[in-house]
Amino acid sequence: MRALVYESYGSPAEVLHVGEAPEPHAGPGQVRVRVRAAGVNPVDWKLMGGAMAGGAPLEDPVVPGFDAAGTVDEVGEGVTGVAVGDEVLGLGSGAQAELSVLWAWAPKPAEIDWSVAAAAPTAVETTERALRLVGVEPGQIVFVDGGAGGVGAVAVQMAVAQGLTVVASASEANQGYLRELGATPVVYGDGLVERVRAAAPGGVDVVYDVAGKTPVEDLLALAPQPGKVVSIANFTLPQHGGISTGGGQPGERRGPESMALAADLLRRNAVVIKVQTFPYERAAEAYATSTSGHVRGKLVLLP
């Protein structure tokens, strides 16, 4: 099948290309979809760069991507409630291809564009898990560090939908965008702690770091206690008493429930995702945009 592939570690511009890959098949508890759109996430290029390989060489070609929206064309053993031809969004592996196998999915709302559906899975699952692990209650104040990017913009809207007051950071150019999302905006960088405290004089209850750029000591300084700081991008937080999602430990991830939540949020327009789309042939351009760290909304690839 046609797919995006890399055979060695490196930057997307160096190693990623359109090629051929074996067709995957749905195993027990899985479905296979014919992909209509696939999301791009920072974890994709971090894996591609070998940052999580521990120095070990790549043994087999890899098809990147975890977020897909498409039409079910194969149903695995034990799967009920879905049939060939159903339109779904979900989490899987090798999403940036013609065919992808999903382990968690939900029906795609008919009124939602394929590209928007493919932009939601990781952002919603990650945020649901992070806010659940750190413990939030309606009426509390949450600071989202990096609120204009792919996960951040979804996180801001999900927090608002949960009845939270949101302060969020972004560049000067994205302050208006944060207001549109429902957050009180602050500019990131030097002096961030003081700006957040000025925006929330009574303090914030939870800090959710999605960018991994702010020093840990600043994140901790904003929270009432270390256990109220959670990050999807800083894996050193647990050393300081904070929480790092780290891809999810066994029992932490609630994939099917998160996908149902994603579909519901999109259907109700509680989460509106701005997307930039690229054909597979321009995947390197999409990845370059992601690695730049200056993304508004989500990047999506189209077969």
Image (spheres, grey):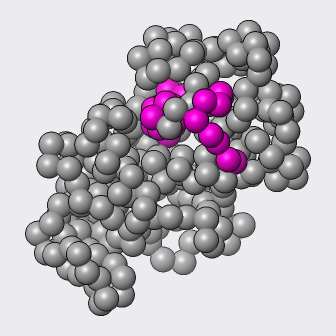
Image x and y of residue 105, in percent = 33, 64
Image x and y of residue 157, in percent = 45, 32
Q: Residue furthest bottom?
A: 77
**How many badges with numbers are in the image?**
0
Tell me the magenta residue range: 134-161
Above or below 131: residue 254: below
Residue at 54% x, 78% y: name it. 59
Residue at 28% x, 76% y: name it. 31
In front here: 137 or 201?
A: 137
Above or below 194: residue 98: below
Image x and y of residue 251, in percent = 61, 71
Quarter holding the N terminus? bottom left
Q: Quadrant of residue 214?
A: top right
Above or below 61: residue 3: above
Q: Is residue 67 visible?
A: no
Instruction: Tell me if 231 is positioned left or right of 172 in this view.
Output: right
Residue 160 colored in magenta in the image:
yes
Residue at 53% x, 50% y: name it. 128
Instruction: Tell me if 278 is positioned left or right of 150 in this view.
Output: left
